[in-house]
Amino acid sequence: KSIVYWMRMGDLRTVDNRALAAASQQAAGDKLPLVVLFVLSPQDYLAHDRSKRRIDFVLRNLSVIKVSLAELNIPLHTISHTIRRTLPSKLMSFLESLQCTQLFANMEYEVDELRRDLQILALSKEKGIRPHYFQDRCIIDPGIVKTKDGKAHTVYSPYQRTWIATLNENLDTYLEESPLPQANASTIHEDPILGPLFSTPVPDFVDGFQLDPADRSTMANVWPAGSTAAQEILSRFLNTKSRPSQLGAADPLADGAEQSDKCSRILVYGEQRDRGDRDTTSRLSPYLSAGVISARQCVRATMSLTGLTKVDAGKTTGIGRWVQELAWRDFYTNVLAHFPRVSMGRPFQEKLADVRWEVDEEHLTAWKQGATGIPIVDAAMRQMNTMGWLHNRMRMIVAMFLSKDLMLDWRLGERYFMEQLVDGDLASNNGGWQWSASTGVDPAPYFRIFNPYIQSSKADPTGDYIRTFVPELKSLKGPEIHNPPIKVADKLGYPRPIVVHAEVRERAIRRYKNPGQE
Ligand code: FAD
């Protein structure tokens, strides 16, 4: 007999993992061996537009976890499954082969995954296996923070105020660190069924999601796998002294940053976080969305830094501002859990479902390739295409540009982001896209359209960001880098702008004002 913990794509860690800790406790109590299972499901990855980078990141993390679990005599076993619809029955057969008595997992809030888990609940009852689902993704679980009328918040500020009050009143509940799993008896290695699970390797790739070797090694440098790497990135953000080069040569912005080594990034986060030309943010999103580090741990780390007994989420310190970003992550997950339509390709603001979009493959391709002739947009898209990651302000600029200046359906952009990002997360990505396209919860008002040139001079005042990712413009100094004169651009082989911002801005306002018309 055995106890199984089913590790999902968003909980790739052994430290501070609620379902894993509970499974381990159960196994110890029942004197049964614990098995960790991971199911690779390429059809699910296709359906969710998962990027090759993300799948590669998952596999690299699983390899690290396999080694650390083996030290505790816990096997991590991966099974590959092709037909997503039959995953629940395949899982059940596998659990039966292990004589599993209880199954543990952390919840996933996306609609398809919730439906799958409901099926598993029903099937496991038939098979006499007890399932246990835990909430582990957020700092405060979806459904807890509500409006006075008991409804889900659809505006961030009041959500965040209730969120911080709820958190500070229940710190032990929400920030408690789950214990590490306990070791299995070493005799498990001799077990004819469980012993062989130790020797099945984590595959190097999943069919259809294979990165070419050069990309794979870039990714391994830029986004190293494992909880220890995530910890280092967190301390690099929090501490003044240690600043190991996370991104090395692959990211020229990482070193020689203007903000001084005397001051940690988090302390100046409030003032500097919108700067794309400097390495100003934590760059923890790939680790948070894959669950390589828990959001709880990030909050606990800020408390150690402030030395306070309460969590600071105020606007006056960089630390508080950063905690507010973690609250955005909870907010969008809460929205996803309450309004399933957002994960079904529908706008949150249903009245904007009929906004008329352009159909223009050439513009879409230019946007994807970073060849729009608007330097900040091109720099951002090229950064994403190389690193699989993008600074938040840059995400907003390119998303606003696609949905307002090009008037292309925001869902095309949302999908392209998922296909490229290493940190792709349905809730945050959809939230960010619907914010930019003015169709979401608490969105940017449709008439407040970013002027990409003004945004560029604010987010990249030195021009270093553009120079790094748009080498054609490397020789330009001063403000003309943001909007190079046509003659200069032609000479440098840089494309002319594909739209004139002032003109297309009016079109967007008209169409948003009268959805369904024109
Ligand atoms: P930091 O500034 O250091 O913030 C710390 C953490 O807080 C982040 O790692 C992230 O987990 C969370 N966070 C910060 N800002 C936001 C936000 N606006 N919404 C939700 N969580 C936030 N984030 C993703 O993790 N995955 C996505 O797929 C994703 N897609 C986005 C698409 C668009 C169009 C936009 C505008 C934003 C998107 N974001 C997404 C949110 C945000 O841009 C990234 O989380 C952030 O840039 C990651 O960098 P960081 O880790 O250095 O962030």
Image (cartoon, rainbow, N blue to C red):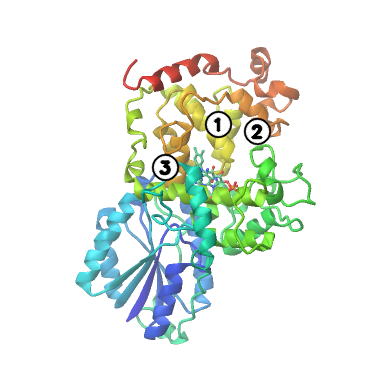
Q: Secondary structure at mark 2?
A: helix
Of residues 79 and 422, which is closer to you in this image?
422
Q: CA distance from mark 3 to mark 1?
A: 23 Å
Residue drawn 67% across and 27% down? 457
Give the mark count. 3
**Label 1 with label 2: CB-CB less than 8 Å:** yes
Precedes in sequence: disc 3 or disc 2? 3
Quadrant of the frame with the N terminus: bottom left
Residue drawn 32% across and 17% down? 517
Residue at disc 1, CB closer than 8 Å to ligand 1: no
Residue 200 seen in the current view: no
Looking at the picture, how far across and down is residue 173, in whole percent? 49, 67
Q: Secondary structure at mark 3?
A: loop
For the residue marked with disc 3, what is the amino acid? Thr
Badge 2: few (under 14), some or many (20 or more) residues near its Cα, within 10 Å?
Answer: many
Specify whether 380 is left or right of 447. right
Of residues 62 and 444, which is closer to you in this image?
444
Residue 36, above or below 339:
below
Badge 1: few (under 14), some or many (20 or more) residues near its Cα, within 10 Å?
Answer: many
For the residue marked with disc 1, what is the amino acid? Ile
Of the two numbered discs 3 and 1 in the rendering, the one whose residue sits closer to the viewer: 3
Residue at disc 3, CB closer than 8 Å to ligand 1: no
Q: Which mark is residue 459?
A: 2
Residue on which disc 3 sits: 154
Residue drawn 58% across and 35% down? 394
Specify whether 101 is left or right of 493. left
Quadrant of the frame with the C terminus: top left
Q: Which mark is residue 397?
A: 1
Looking at the picture, how far across and down is residue 386, in whole percent? 57, 40
For the residue marked with disc 2, what is the amino acid? Ala
Looking at the picture, how far across and down is residue 170, in whole percent? 50, 64
Residue 352 seen in the current view: yes
